[in-house]
Amino acid sequence: MNEAKHSRKTNLFIILGSIFLTNAILAEVIGVKIFSAEKTLGFTPVNWNFFGEYILDFNLTAGAVIWPVVFITTDIINEYFGKKGVRKISFITAGLIAYVFIVISVVTVLVPADFWLDVNATTPDGESFNISYAFNTIFRQGLGIILGSLTAFLLGQLIDVYVFQKLRAITGEKMIWLRATGSTFVSQFIDSFVVLGIAFYVFGNWELSQVLAVGIINYIYKFTVAIALTPLLYVGHNIIDRYLGKDLASKMMEEASEDKAFI
């Protein structure tokens, strides 16, 4: 019986960790694309004026689309495995993100094969196309973006788990929505501005007002989607409780709440 419970507990961490890893790394890779949320939905860009200087629409990085999944998964891991579980998967993920960036940096300097350039030399419309340049432009990211992404990721995760557990100490096992929403409210604020500040203000040429303007839009989107996905947290919670069994689930949540370390 103990072996069966340990197996279910291990399987749960592997599944949640896999979802977390996949979405976090994928968000970093596809984040190079900036898309218009209004045009995607068929609306005219809002053209908001921020700080009397910048016209800003709902332009977001593609990575932001799936980033709320990372925070929801964080909350579920936090619920059953506590701070230790979140710290473990967060540091593993940060290491793998760094590994991905290193591999991409290496492969983008490899000399392309002539036939590969030739067979992809034109677009379907017959226009000239340099696939090697396109590949490098899409996948290669600057040092500032890499450092900003990793710093924002780790800070966001560690702050999320801290706020989540603080709220859990107040609410107990009830009001999952409050501790999930509250921790997301704080952590995504940090995540939205830190990455832009490091990548484009410290290492780039953006004005602070531009960082704030873009950060506000990113934060509004992430927090709004996180709230909209809150019901999935309850669905996931119920599925996991049934999989683990009431006794094991309660024991794991109790153990998860006992870690009083700062981070």
Image (cartoon, helix red, strand yellow):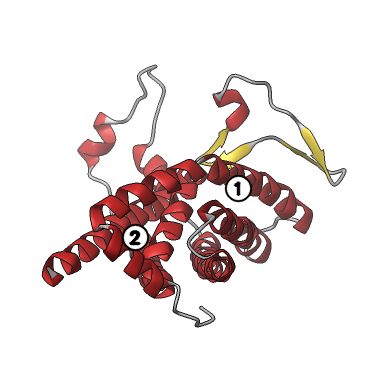
Nearest to the eye among marks 2 and 1: give it.
1
Residue at 28%, 37% (x, y): give it.
117
Q: Does residue 202 sit above or below 178 in this rendering? A: below
Tell me where residue 87 appears, x and y as whole percent: 41, 72
Tell me where residue 161 appears, x and y as whole percent: 50, 68
Q: At label 1, which amino acid type do we have?
A: Phe
Cα distance in 3D space between marks 2 and 1: 27 Å
The residue nearer to you, when weighing 173 against 48, is: 173
Residue at 69%, 35% (x, y): give it.
57
Q: Does residue 64 sit above or below 127 in this rendering? A: below
- Per the image, the residue denoted by label 1 is 223
The image's mark for residue 198 is: none
Q: Secondary structure at mark 2?
A: helix
The answer to whether 104 appears left or right of 66 in the picture is: left
Q: Quadrant of the N terminus?
A: bottom left
Q: At label 2, which amino acid type do we have?
A: Val
Which comes sooner in the sequence, label 2 or label 1?
A: 2
The residue nearer to you, when weighing 235 against 114, is: 235
Q: Secondary structure at mark 1?
A: helix
- Per the image, the residue denoted by label 2 is 100
